[in-house]
Image (cartoon, rainbow, N blue to C red):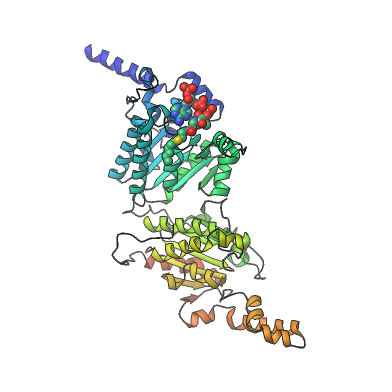
Amino acid sequence: MAEKSKSLDLRARMRNALQGGGEKAIEKQKATGKLTARERIIAVLDPKTFHEYDLFVQHAGKDFDMGKKYLPGDGVVTGTGTILGHPVCIYAQDFTVAGGSLGYMHAKKITKIMDHAMKLKVPLIGINDSGGARIQEGVNSLAGYGEIFYRNTQASGVIPQISVILGPCAGGAVYSPALTDFVFVVDKISKMFITGPEVIKTVLGEEISMEALGGARTHAEITGNAHFYAESEMECFGQIKQLVSFIPWNNFKKADPFPPKKPNTRKFKIDDIIPNDPKEPYDVRDLIKAVVDDSDFFEIQELFAANIVIGFARLEGQTVGFVANQPLVLAGVLDVDSSDKAARFIRYCDAFNIPLVTFVDLPGYLPGVEQEHAGVIRHGAKLLYAYSEATVPKITLIVRKAYGGGYIAMCSHHLRADFVFAWPSAEIAVMGPEGAANIIFRKEIQEAKDPNALREAKIAEYKEKFANPYVAAAYGYIDAVIEPAETRHFLTHALSISSNKSVESPKKKHGIPPF
Ligand code: HXC
């Protein structure tokens, strides 16, 4: 009997703790289109796999009458479960409890589950919905954030860290996500900023809405802080599952192999994708889909710096990270944002044993005062650094233009690509034929009887000499000039023979990338 009453007592305590911030607060949460913290965790994980811990943790606040307040679970739900059979550690801040604000014990719960993730070597998923540091708990809240940031940094490159922004995330609540690998946002629900519209108005006199300042679209398109954008929470959870299917549990593992599938070559005809006119654009994603398994390409940061495309796909069942210039946007040039975007992705793939495939078609770096003053030298150097540093298999295909610095930066042999292939349409030169002819034959053109005719003749001469892959191939900078239809075969062969690649980097504590 005594045992039964203890069980009843446990159930009553659980009911009390599971109520979160109570009916009213939950109603308010739902009215804004948001799920509750536990509903979110259950929706992300495989059915019936969620195990919650630290349900009875209580806050440690004493000031401002906090001692009298009961904050169920201290505003955060933590536990373990699986996604597609992969074990994961997870936490979700509960906005219905003190706005999901982070106090001392709230932070302890998060750091405890982070420590578990590191010990178990499994991915960590953080669902953020928080007003930031709990104001009443003062320096203990700040300390809590510091402990989280430290762990995010230690875990970086060891376990995948995934952040989901599902509410107004202010102050400290945005820096932990910024230190993680992938940030997911949802239209109208996600907000991220260091200082909100009120502070901006007070300090600077500028008026801006929360949505325009730090809404989902802003972070997916303009700042690049978000990697995945969804229209609803459920769509976002589907994206997380897809991502988890492509990546390994930790940096000692490879991603799970999937059954190989042929690309949909009826929909994506590789011979028809590149226009005959080298100045005409095309969508490089079609090219990727024409060669990868099931034509399934999982794009990352689709809306940000769209002049470069990054994402995961599979070749013969094995996960591969793709980096490709996008001729549809700014002719595929490299600039500050596209260099940042690609460099970070390359480092992710390298840390997690994911081979890299690079498709090249670019006229070089974007010229202009704006880019120079925005630090295109420093940002562009990140790409050189990331490719040079990466020791995973690196395979490059030059599709069309590979001009100037762009040729070097897009994983040339000189940055230690393992294999560089080129299509017959490849043009590898210091710059495009028009620009080159105008510079090297300027005097002759100016002095000619018919400058236009001579210019055209010189352009044709330059094209004949350099606008092809054979000069580079003659020096061994290209390993094979291949027909488009042979692309998948060459890529999969190169990948399979590189599977035991091993490269010793110089012994050092760490390099100093141009952050
Ligand atoms: C304590 C907080 C809180 C906080 C919200 N709440 N933020 N309690 N500390 N930081 C509480 C509210 O008092 C309220 O409690 C409940 O959460 C819901 O908040 P509302 O304001 O009613 O919700 P909403 O209108 O949706 O506005 C959400 C919000 C707003 C935009 C997040 O609450 C807000 O601006 N909060 C403060 C954000 C902020 O400046 N945080 C500090 C950042 S400094 P009741 O009891 O009424 O339900 C920081 C330092 C770390 O984080 C820096 C590290 C680098």
The spot of residue 9 in percent (x, y) is: 30, 15
Q: Count the labels in the image.
A: 0
Residue placed furthest toward the top: 1
Is 249 on the left or on the right of 221, as rendered? left
Residue 131 appearing in the image: no
Task: Check the picture and name the quadrant holding the C terminus.
Answer: bottom left
Q: Which of these two is toward me, 218 or 250?
A: 218
The spot of residue 255 in percent (x, y) is: 38, 53
Q: Residue at x 37, y 67 (%)?
A: 498
Residue 323 appearing in the image: yes
Is 111 on the left or on the right of 220, as rendered? left
Q: Is residue 444 above or below residue 418?
A: below
Q: Is residue 246 above or below residue 434?
A: above
Q: Is residue 475 above or below residue 181?
A: below
Q: Residue at x 48, y 36 (%)?
A: 170
Quarter of the view holding residue 41: top left
The spot of residue 32 in percent (x, y) is: 56, 29
Residue placed furthest toward the left: 2
Task: Check the picture and name the quadrant holding the N terminus.
Answer: top left
Residue placed furthest toward the right: 449
Is 332 on the left or on the right of 96, as rendered? right
Q: Which of these two is toward me, 148 or 275?
A: 148
The spot of residue 367 in percent (x, y) is: 60, 65
